[in-house]
Image (cartoon, rainbow, N blue to C red):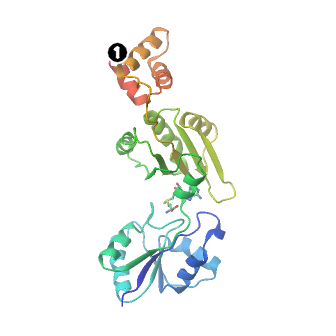
Amino acid sequence: MAGILYLVPTPIGNLGDISQRCRQTLEQADFIAAEDTRVSLKLLNHLGIKKSLVSYYEHNKAFKGSVIVDRILAGETCALVSDAGSPAISDPGEDLVKECAEAGITVIAIPGPCAAITALSVSGQPTGRFCFEGFLSTAKKSRKEHLESLQSEQRTMIFYEAPHKLLTTLEDMAAVFGENRPVSLCRELTKLHEEIVRTTLGNAIALYTQQPPKGEFVLIVAGAQPSTAPIATVEDAASHVAALMAQGLSRKDAVKQTAKDLDLPKNVVYDAALTL
Ligand code: SAM
């Protein structure tokens, strides 16, 4: 009889967040598939668990997936862990779940720590409807396309981001969503320096320009407001820019000010200014 694949979430900072069920599952599994065996070994040592570990990560998953599936089909039980949080959520696992499901293997997900849901809960943003957007691409063109596809998204949006890319990401978001869009920056969740900054994209840019971001971040960005007021048109934006330039502002400053005054994304105003 085939074994089972268990998805075992691990703490995102505070080791006290490992649940009894996760601990038992790790103890009882025949083997553990881990994103980084060195990281998981530290957790297992902390829990006093000795178990055979195999690595399963982005660059070996195509080959390792079928090895793991074969072992489970032969009757072994596998516990899958990532470095932190829930496997398969912006972490390796998605493909393994698919492969196991296709092979008729039972997959059981144990609930537990997930940075996205922890951040959403504490964000103060609407939680009734949300979408998870994960990491933006590092390629300029596809990140722009990704953000533009969300321009009129009304649900609360969840993004993961690394600290060294945070400022660029906030700037790219402000260009598409506008500087006044509310954002909750959830930093170092469950850790000593946990901090939630509830502000706007514009203010967040000012803050992290002064004080370089450190630690891990989840960004919870408010969705677009369903508009009741007439939306400013490209023509409105162009004439507003023209009026400000006539007052002596540079084109760049006029675009910035217009985006703020008319609550329009900077890229829309910039395109409008090009028609002048
Ligand atoms: N699968 C994981 C989960 O369920 O939480 C997410 C893994 S993803 C590779 C790592 C990203 O999650 C980080 O870049 C950061 O955006 C977010 N993250 C993880 N731990 C965090 C923490 N303690 N505080 C804030 N964000 C965190």
Relative side of 66 to 44, left or right? left
Q: Position of residue 83 (x, y in %)?
A: 52, 67
Place of residue 237 in the rendered image (x, y in percent of width and height, measured from the top left): 40, 20
Q: Nearer the viewer, residue 94 or 65?
A: 94
Q: Is residue 208 left or right of residue 70?
A: right
Q: Quadrant of residue 226?
A: top left
* 117 vs 30, nearest the viewer: 117
Q: Is residue 63 visible?
A: no
**Label 1 CA crowd tier, 10 Å (few <14, some 14–19, many 20+):** few
Q: Quadrant of the C terminus?
A: top left
**What residue is shown at x 50% (from left), y 66% (from top)?**
86
Q: Is mark 1 within 8 Å of ligand 1?
A: no
Residue 242 screen position, x and y as percent: 41, 13
Residue 126, percent across and down? 53, 46
Q: Quadrant of the N terminus?
A: bottom left
Count of marks, rendered view = 1
Residue type, mark 1 in image: Leu
Whether residue 39 is visible here, answered yes or no, is: yes
In the figure, 246 relative to 267: above or below?
above
Task: Identify the secondary structure beneath mark 1.
Answer: loop
* Residue at which label 1 appears: 276
